[in-house]
Image (cartoon, rainbow, N blue to C red):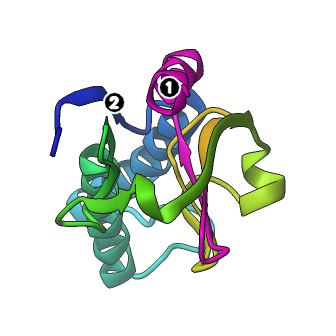
């Protein structure tokens, strides 16, 4: 068995629009908590209850932590491809090349095809992606499909050409 790593990639959610949205929501809850809980002045014309503000603040912090720890790791060797979408996958998922009928790099439309980014789709047609619109499409011998997002489509394609050259 040759498990020499031919390709490895780590991806995180880095979209400015996403982090901008998260910062705005955090800011609203921080300001409302400061004004209403610390200063005792109701926040807004229809203020939330103090408990709701505290729950919202902790929910924002939890979402921040989740997005900070999300990581999509892809590793390709001559024997297999491993994919780990942490924290959902505590261990990498291993797919043997012998179980794969076809592998190719392709452009895709994340929202139209899969409803966005993250772990998307159903068991027979799933996607793991964090950003962009280039992915490694795997078609298994049993008919299932898996798309793994990548920021390095050409590099992944070069590895596939090297792996499957006759």
Taking the magenta stretch, the answer to whether it contains residue 61 is no
Circles 2 and 1: CB distance less than 8 Å?
Answer: yes
Q: Is residue 40 visible?
A: no
Identify the residue position indicated by label 1 in the image. 156
Q: Secondary structure at mark 1?
A: helix
The image quarter containing residue 140 is bottom right
Q: Nearer the viewer, mark 2 or mark 1?
A: 1
Q: How many marks?
A: 2
Q: In this orientation, which residue lies closer to the viewer: 119 or 2?
A: 2
* Identity of the residue drawn at 52% across and 73% down: 47
* Identity of the residue drawn at 65% across and 38% down: 104
In the rendered structure, find residue 166 and report the number of the disc placed on it. none
Q: Is residue 136 visible?
A: yes
* Identity of the residue drawn at 23% across and 59% down: 92
Identify the residue position indicated by label 2 in the image. 9
Looking at the image, is mark 2 or mark 1 earlier in the sequence?
2
State the separation of the CA atoms marked 2 and 1.
10 Å
């Amino acid at each position: 068995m040759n498990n020499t790593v031919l390709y490895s990639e780590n991806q995180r959610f880095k979209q400015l629009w996403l982090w901008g949205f998260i910062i705005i929501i955090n800011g609203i809850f921080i300001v409302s908590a400061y004004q209403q809980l610390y200063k005792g002045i109701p926040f807004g014309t229809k203020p939330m209850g103090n408990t709701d503000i505290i729950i919202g603040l902790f929910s924002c912090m939890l979402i921040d932590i989740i997005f900070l720890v999300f990581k999509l790791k892809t590793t390709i060797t001559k024997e297999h491809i491993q994919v780990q979408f942490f924290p959902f996958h505590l261990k990498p998922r291993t797919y043997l090349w012998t179980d794969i009928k076809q592998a190719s790099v392709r452009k895709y439309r994340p929202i139209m095809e899969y409803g966005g980014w993250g772990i998307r789709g159903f068991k027979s047609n799933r996607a793991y992606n964090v950003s962009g619109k280039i992915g490694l499409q795997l078609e298994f011998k049993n008919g299932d499909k898996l798309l793994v997002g990548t920021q390095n489509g050409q590099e992944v394609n070069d590895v596939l050409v090297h792996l499957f050259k006759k």
